[in-house]
Structures are given as structure tokens and as C-alpha cells.
Image (cartoon, rainbow, N blue to C red):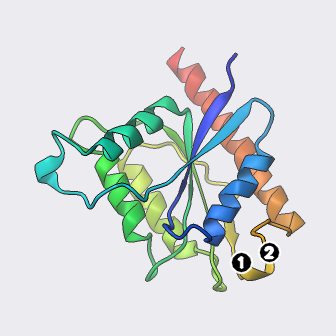
Amino acid sequence: MDASVILGIVGSLRRTSYNHYALKAACELAPDGVELKLIELHDIPVYNQDDELAPPAAVVEFKRQIRAADAVLFCSPEYNYSVPGGLKNAIDWASRPYGDSAWRGKAAAVMGASIGALGTARAQYHLRQILVTLDMPTVTQPEVMIANAAQHFDKDGRLTDEPTRQLIQKLLEALAALIRINRNMED
């Protein structure tokens, strides 16, 4: 059987974000038979319903990559108690036009890093609400909320906190198991 492909989407547009670093760590921690590919949201324009029937090339490519993956791993900071606008915008583009959502049925998992004490808890719960409406089966445990992120990464962005690395590994194993369940349901 071919390797499972997980598309890693970072909710921050900042190249040196802790969430970007956390996804890089997840690439190292992926279980055997799983490939984690990262995608950037920098080129996705602001959603405009007038353009959804002829979307920009960046959106077409984004939807293609989602469809080609077996699952999606979202790693997002928290902005104003919720998901960042850039991430929500990308989610909206990939769900449109009505009836042509790239997300439908795609297995998902959520994690996030923050310099704050709650470690993206509120953003993750909002994102999980969005995933319900997108019909994405989502890993519920473990929850990976990296609080006080500056203490968990070194100056080069490497995740150095071993308990957090183990938690990410467990999340990826749970997502890989969800991929297998989805495949069995398709057969």
C-alpha cells in the first residue's frame, strides 16, 4: 500500500511562527508509512464569491493538494480568541463553490502553538466547529496545545520539549488510524 499523505496547513503567515516550527517537527515525527507535506497560504487572495466559479490559480492548486492528500493537519495560532483570518479565508475558498468542497470527508487533526498560557485552546475549538460543517472526521484526542511556546523551541525553531514531541507523535498516529478507517469505509 502507498504511503498515506497528510497535508500540513499552518494558520500563520509568518515564516518564523511557532506553528510553522511545530509542523516541521511533525514532519520528523510522522509514523512509518505516512508522509507529511507542508503547504503555505501566502498566495491565496481574499475570498470573493464573484470569483468562485473561476478561482485564482493559487486556489485551484490549493484545492488540488487537499484532494490529493489522505488527511489534513491544521496547526494554527490564536488571533483574538479564534482562528486567523488567513486560515479561515483559505478554508472558505476550498469549500466553494457550493457542492465542490475539497474538504468533504477528509480526515483531519488540529494542533497549535502560542506564547500564551492557553496554547490556542479557543482557536482550536472554533476550528473544530468549522470542520464539523465541512464534514471532516477529526481526531479528538490527544489535544496538542503548545502553551508558552518560546520555552519549547530553541533559537533555530527546533521543538526541544520531549513531552510535546511525544504528544505530536500520538496525534499523528491517531490521524493515521483515522485515515485507515476512512479507507476501509470506502472499500
Residue lying furthest left: 50
Q: Is residue 1 above or below residue 78?
A: above
Residue 70 is drawn in which quadrant? top right
Mark number displayed over residue 152: 2
Q: Position of residue 7 (x, y in %)?
A: 56, 43
Residue type highlighted by circle 2: His
> Helix, strand, or loop for circle 2?
loop
Residue lying furthest right: 162
Q: Please name the residue shown 69% across and 62% down the image.
A: 22
Q: Can residue 143 be seen in this view?
A: no
> Helix, strand, or loop for circle 1?
helix
Residue type highlighted by circle 1: Ala
Q: Is residue 171 visible?
A: yes
* Discs 2, 1 touching: Cβ within 8 Å: yes
Residue 75 is drawn in which quadrant? bottom right
Most foreground residue, 165 or 125:
165
Q: Residues within 10 Å of mark 1 (few under 14, many from 20)?
A: many
Most foreground residue, 114 or 62:
62
Position of the N terminus by quadrant = top right
Most foreground residue, 95 or 124:
95
Q: How crowded is mark 2: few (under 14 residues within 10 Å), some or many (20 or more)?
A: many
Q: Please name the residue shown 70% across and 72% down the image.
A: 146
Position of the C terminus by quadrant = top right
Q: Distance between the residues labelled 2 and 1?
A: 5 Å
**Residue annotated with mark 1:** 149
Residue 162 is drawn in which quadrant? bottom right
Q: Please name the residue shown 66% across and 56% down the image.
A: 23
Q: Where is residue 185 in the image (x, y as percent from the top left)?
A: 54, 22
In this image, 14 relative to 156: left or right? left
In this image, 38 relative to 134: left or right? right
Q: Please name the residue shown 37% across and 53% down the image.
A: 91
Q: Position of residue 25 (x, y in %)?
A: 75, 56
